[in-house]
Image: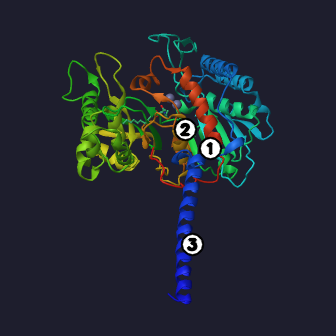
Amino acid sequence: MDHRGAAVKEGLSVGVRALAMGVMGTVLALVAVLLLRAATFPGPEELQRWGRPGASRIPAQFSEAELTAMKEALKEAIRIPTVAFSSENINTTALTEFGEHLRKVFPSMFSTSFIQHEIVEEYSHLFTIRGSNPKLEPYMLLSHMDVVPASDDDWEVPPFSGLERDGFIYGRGTLDNKNSAMAILQAMELLLRRNYVPQRSFYISLGHDEEVSGKHGAQKVAALLKSRGVRLSFIIDEGGYIMNDFLAGIKKPFAVISVSEKGSMNLKLQVDSTPGHSSIPLKETSIGILAAAISRLEQTPMPNMFGYGTEKSMIEQLAGQFGFPLNIVFSNLWIFGPIVSRILEKSRVSNAMMRTTVALTMFNAGIKVNVIPPTAQATVNIRIHPSQTVPEVLDIIQNIVADDRVQYHVLNAFNPLPLSPYDQEAFGYQLLRRTIRDVFPEVSVVVPGVCVGNTDVRHYANISTGLYRFNPVSLSPESFKSVHGLNERISIQAYETQVMFLFELIQNADIEKVPEPHSAVHEL
Ligand SMILES: CCCCCCCC/C=C\CCCCCCCC(=O)N[C@@H](CC(C)C)C(=O)O
Ligand SMILES: [Zn+2]
Ligand SMILES: [Zn+2]
């Protein structure tokens, strides 16, 4: 080999060595970066950061004294009988007392410079919390203070006693919805005491007549905000929960965020017929004609609308929680949809999610045993599936009744609420989802649902498209029955967790938009 050849070989081997060293270096650097990433972000979930990071994050740790005070504040709230019997008959004395109670137990909410408190229509409360970053669109936490009536009969403890027994607080409103009214203010009060200043502005609104329409409370607050030109990024109200033991085949709890709610119609049906002496009866009376008509209504289910609302998404997202073979069936609705919808209509709750329902709630006729009455009236309460409208449903009803002697009077009606977004960019939905993940690690999956009852949030549809119904409390079928029923109660631990959830959610909202996932993020 000549001198030049040796030089080339030397050059080549230097080049190969350099290349090899370069590759090694790159590999080592990559390993180091990966190790560093692994140390900084212990799991993929943490790559998706919400709210304030690091030192400015206030930990949800409460002292014994704070826990005792929050429990006592809720008990006291339960003892104030803010009962709404009808739109015209609400215990307003109790509502005033409730307002005084709020001032007493949440003093910072009434004395902080960046919080404005207003009373709307005498009894509803509106708090405006000004955040430090006016570019972030505000949101609202919504609840109500009024409760449905409860008589002492059949309750294990008096319904307005706020009694503590076996780790539970008993009383009307412990689940619907004084727990939320109190927990929202409690969480913010605790944050304020830790010198928290939100970046994103938000509102807290407590209505006083949700149980009888919301037309004086929520509706007026919404109108007030609209007149001020306010738009809200999203609103969180009651009407979705963490469901425990609700579906045979699913052991772990799952969370339902209701992204819509059914429409409603109260319809009076009336039949007029010839009155007279009961000793010489006609072949048919107003009572008989009307009874037959409403019996047809009761016996004829409205069309099954599975696939036209959120129920399909709900089942698809729940599918993985079922064992074999239901997991296969529920994740292939394109073929098994019709069978699944037939299975779901067997349960009262899932049936109500899939179709418009008709409940016969009032029947009036007759004044004396031997008088054939001239008129019979019945009222039916109809809950309209999100894919249908009031006129469509009225048409179906008239076809089912199919009797020209029946007259119809729509007492009041409204269409179902539009579906609020629940995609990856939907800020309110993803914020809830993320906070559920943080505070309720036992929850297997978060799914969209439809609220079969009506809530105050429907009055805000003209100032926000992100209407979500979710109470951060775990419900079993039994506790579900106690809402508007007997022995309504909340465990003290569940209430503390609700406060913690709101404490975290308020901080999580301090971010511009849903963070970009850095890598594959575990599905909830
Ligand atoms: C497969 C099982 C899943 C179950 C999902 C259930 C998700 C939650 C859905 C509904 C919750 C119902 C609770 C809603 C609260 C209703 C409050 C209320 O009673 N409102 C009145 C309003 C009226 C204007 C007076 C009503 O009658 O709806
Ligand atoms: Zn309620
Ligand atoms: Zn209620």
Q: Nearer the viewer, mark 3 or mark 1?
A: 3
- Closer to the chain start, of discs 3 and 1, is 3
- Closer to the chain start, of discs 1 and 2, is 2
Q: Determine which residue is flagged by label 3.
A: 18
- Closer to the chain start, of discs 3 and 2, is 3
Q: Is residue 310 visible?
A: yes
From the viewer's side, name the closer residue of 180 and 44.
Answer: 44
Instruction: Say which element carries label 1.
Output: helix
Residue 377: x and y, percent? 35, 30
From the viewer's side, name the closer residue of 3 and 253.
Answer: 3
The quadrant of the image that shows the C terminus is: top left
Q: How is the image coloured?
A: rainbow
From the viewer's side, name the closer residue of 8 and 133.
Answer: 8
Tell how many labels: 3
What residue type is disc 2 on? Answer: Asp
Q: Nearer the viewer, mark 1 or mark 2?
A: 2
Mark 1 crowdedness (10 Å alpha carbons): few <14, some 14-19, many ≥20: many
Q: Are marks 1 and 2 in contact (CB under 8 Å)?
A: yes
Left or right: where does residue 124 sit relative to residue 214?
right
Left or right: where does residue 450 sit relative to residue 459?
left
Q: At 46% across and 41% down in the image, what residue appears?
A: 258
Distance from Cα at disc 3 to Cα at disc 2: 49 Å
Q: Determine which residue is flagged by label 1.
A: 508
Q: Is residue 403 visible?
A: no
Instruction: Say which element carries label 2.
Output: helix
Q: At 46% across and 50% down in the image, what residue appears?
A: 419
Residue 438's label in the rendered image is 2
Q: Residue furthest left?
A: 283
Q: At 56% across and 36% down in the image, what residue appears?
A: 214
